[in-house]
């Protein structure tokens, strides 16, 4: 690698100042050269700090500058075939287009998240555990679209019931050995179920007692512990407890954090541990707790077992929800400076929420859907916060901001068929339009294949000759229809009142408009 003189000078100055981290994070190299290999990954930074990664998982990018293997594997529903999804270039970003073409016209789940560290600590479908049966559900490969460094990629969307695990690891901390962990989550997708975790857990899938886990937790469960505000919080799942600090319950120093892209860190060594966090799109890390082990018996010394979990609790509790983009576990207790450098790398890479196109029926685009029946041409499909039903109501430029946002949708690849579409709420991310008993609701994914089908609609030419109609993938004679200002799934004649043939063609025909927000 040849460096221009000013970069060499800058590098020397930074080295002299002890800030190799800034260079490593790609801040300088990112602007000075297009060479991927010149930019270090998070695991290069941890290695330079003397605390190398022993597990490195990401569906979006390489975590080492030289990594050129597979990131993850998908399996498609149509024929059960699997495919490894790799990188666009060594050290670079996921080849999402390979997933798009392999899964075209069917659905795909993520079957393996490969370990980039060389330790073979791959995450696969979690087995049954003490709290819940298994194997767990696998994540829909299209449910967490993202851009990273301007490239399209997919995260791991954990609906309740979804979980990954590796009970037979190598190099992961056991007993009271020190380790560090970070993960990037979607700070807007969470719940209060147990336990959206990434990190160290039991090898038996059972709760084997206090101190047998050390995983990053994210969500708003306050059953064991909590921080300030209403949550969500980054906490440490140490088994039989989500800890926000030294106290068993409330530690006010652990704030509510809900950045769209959230960096979450937990590290632990002998009678010492810390929680840190930050916005994964900008700025540095804050330390939310740094001190001794909890003042409850069983957590000092720790009894870590060295399995790895994602999306579940140590005993396979699987009521939780969240989204994971990347994460690592290290050998050794990383310094704050090393972690700060990792955060600089993350913010330099640039996570984003995806396409900015509007008014188009293509994944990533924001749209509004306007009724075409003469009664209702100023009405749009919106969700109704009162009861989560989908309705039509008038929206215009002077409508309240909430009304406009309630009538705005993000087009997604269909959860049950990628050649069709799913509509995600613009102001309630992670919740989708789905039918149930042939009425339309805004709901979070419950992880079932029924949900995926109930939320998948195939666009067709408008049944009245105007605009578009949206055919249900699991009830292909039925279409999205408004009837008495409520949105239903309706056939042209049928047993429900909303199957009435009068106005069926008009009521099932919609204009795809520019989004209200
Ligand atoms: O520590 C919280 C949870 O308690 C663990 O994840 C689980 O194993 C147990 O139910
Ligand atoms: O909306 C029709 C069916 O009703 C859905 O497929 C199912 O979720 C519910 O039973």
Image: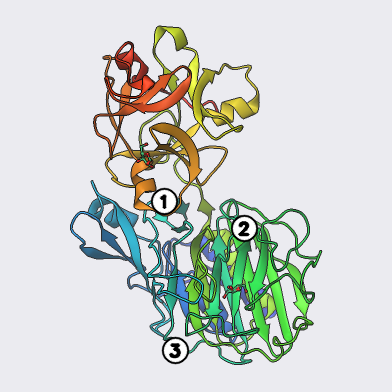
Query: Which residue is more in the foreground, 269 or 336?
Result: 269
Labelled pair 2, 1 in contact (Cβ < 8 Å): no
Q: Secondary structure at mark 2?
A: loop
Which sits in the foreground, 44 or 119?
119
Ligand 2 shown in quarter? top left
Please, what secondary structure does the residue beneath circle 3 have?
loop
Sooner in the amino-acid sequence: mark 2 or mark 1: 1
Residue 206 appears in the picture as rendered: yes
Q: Which residue is mark 2?
A: 192
Mark 1 residue crowding within 10 angstroms, few (<14) / some (14–19) / many (20+): many
Q: CA distance from mark 2 to mark 1?
A: 20 Å
Q: Is residue 290 left or right of residue 48?
A: right
Instruction: Say if 200 sits above or below 59 in the image.
Output: below
Q: Which residue, given by chain and number where applicable, does mark 1 sit on? A: 143
Looking at the image, tell me whether mark 3 or mark 2 is earlier in sequence order: 3
Count the labels in the image: 3
Front of the two marks 2 and 1: 2
- Across and down, in percent, residue 202 comes to 52, 83
In three-dimensional space, the C-alpha distance between marks 3 and 2, rounded to whole angstroms, equals: 31 Å
Q: Nearer the viewer, residue 343 or 495?
A: 495
Which of the colour schemes (rainbow, by chain, secondary structure, one colour) is used? rainbow
């Amino acid at each position: 690698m040849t460096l221009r003189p000013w970069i060499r000078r800058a590098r020397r100055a930074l080295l002299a100042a002890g800030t190799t981290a800034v260079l490593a994070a790609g801040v300088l190299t990112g602007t000075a050269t297009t060479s991927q290999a010149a930019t270090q990954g998070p695991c290069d930074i941890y290695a330079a700090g003397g605390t190398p990664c022993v597990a490195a998982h990401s569906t979006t990018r390489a975590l080492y500058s030289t990594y050129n293997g597979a990131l993850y594997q998908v399996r498609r529903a149509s024929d059960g075939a699997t495919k490894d999804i790799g990188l666009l270039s060594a050290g670079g970003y996921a080849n999402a287009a390979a997933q798009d073409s392999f899964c075209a016209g069917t659905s795909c789940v993520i079957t393996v998240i490969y370990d980039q560290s060389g330790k073979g600590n791959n995450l696969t479908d979690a087995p049954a555990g003490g709290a819940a049966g298994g194997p767990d559900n696998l994540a829909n490969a299209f449910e967490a679209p993202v851009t990273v460094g301007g490239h399209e990629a997919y995260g791991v969307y954990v609906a309740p019931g979804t979980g990954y695990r590796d009970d037979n690891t190598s190099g992961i901390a056991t007993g009271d050995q020190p380790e560090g962990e970070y993960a990037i989550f979607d700070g807007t997708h969470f719940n209060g179920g147990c336990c959206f975790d990434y990190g160290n857990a039991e090898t038996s899938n059972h709760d084997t007692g206090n101190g047998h886990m050390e995983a990053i937790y994210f969500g708003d469960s306050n059953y064991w512990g909590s921080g300030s505000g209403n949550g969500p919080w980054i906490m440490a799942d140490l088994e039989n407890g989500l800890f926000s600090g030294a106290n068993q319950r409330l530690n006010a120093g652990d704030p509510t954090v809900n950045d769209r892209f959230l960096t979450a860190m937990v590290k632990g060594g002998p009678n010492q541990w810390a929680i840190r966090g930050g916005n994964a799109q900008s700025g540095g890390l804050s330390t939310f707790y740094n001190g001794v082990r909890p003042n409850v018996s069983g957590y000092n010394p720790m009894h870590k077992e060295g399995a790895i979990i994602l999306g579940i609790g140590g005993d396979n509790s699987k009521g939780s929800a969240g989204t994971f983009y990347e994460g690592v576990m290290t050998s050794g207790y990383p310094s704050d400076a090393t972690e700060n450098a990792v955060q600089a790398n993350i913010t330099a890479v640039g996570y984003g929420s995806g396409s900015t196109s509007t008014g188009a029926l293509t994944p990533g685009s924001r749209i509004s859907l306007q009724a075409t029946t003469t009664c209702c041409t100023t009405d749009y499909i919106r969700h109704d916060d009162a009861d989560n039903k989908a309705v039509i109501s008038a929206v215009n430029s002077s409508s309240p901001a909430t009304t406009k946002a309630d009538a705005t949708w993000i087009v997604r690849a269909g959860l049950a068929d990628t050649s069709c579409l799913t509509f995600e709420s613009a102001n309630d991310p992670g919740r989708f339009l789905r039918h149930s008993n042939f009425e339309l609701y805004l709901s979070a994914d419950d992880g079932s294949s029924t949900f995926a089908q109930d939320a998948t609609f195939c666009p067709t030419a408008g049944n009245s000759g105007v605009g578009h109609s949206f055919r249900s993938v699991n009830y292909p004679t039925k279409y999205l229809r408004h009837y008495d200002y409520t949105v239903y799934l309706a056939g042209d004649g049928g047993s429900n009142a909303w199957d009435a043939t009068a106005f069926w063609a008009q009521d099932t025909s919609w204009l795809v408009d520019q989004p209200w927000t």
